[in-house]
Image: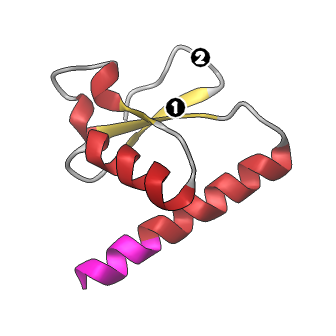
């Protein structure tokens, strides 16, 4: 994992295609993220950029939605 130069963002390893993942996450949960491909055209498809810029309760809800989305992906893959 690479560190971001901003203390309010981070890069996280994602599935295979961060563009599709970000689109699906937004459509199914309403949580907006940025595909890593927007920042690194070579390796960025493997990363998703998150920005934590909101009220704490809203961030907790976003994390809950992301967690549920990932759990649903895992159960669909099983």
Decide: few, some or many residues near mark 1? Use Cα within 10 Å; few <14, some 14-19, many ≥20. Answer: some
Residue lying farthest to the left in this orientation: 42
The image position of residue 56, as x and y in percent, is 83, 45
- State the image quarter where residue 38 is shown: top left
Counting every numbered tag in the picture gives 2
Q: Who's the residue at 34% across and 75% down the image?
A: 74
> From what the image shows, is residue 45 above or below residue 39?
below
Dominant secondary-structure state across the stretch colored magenta: helix
Please give the name of the residue rendered at 57% of the width and 28% of the height, measured from the top-left corner: 9
- Left or right: 50, with 23 as reference point: right
Where's residue 27, x and y in %?
45, 54
Nearer the observer, 62 or 27:
27
Left or right of 14? Residue 4 is: right
Q: What quarter of the picture does the N terminus occupy?
A: top left
Find the distance from the CA under tag 1 to the CA under tag 2: 8 Å
Residue at the disc numbered 2: 6
Q: Which residues are magenta?
A: 71-78
- Which residue is farthest front? 27
């Amino acid at each position: 994992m690479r560190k971001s130069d901003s203390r309010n963002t981070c890069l996280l390893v994602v599935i295979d295609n961060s563009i599709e993942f970000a689109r699906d996450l937004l459509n199914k949960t309403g949580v907006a993220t940025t595909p890593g491909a927007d920042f690194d055209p070579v390796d960025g498809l493997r990363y998703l950029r998150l920005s934590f810029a909101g009220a704490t309760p809203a961030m907790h809800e976003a994390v809950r939605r992301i967690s549920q989305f990932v759990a649903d992906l895992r159960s669909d893959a099983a």
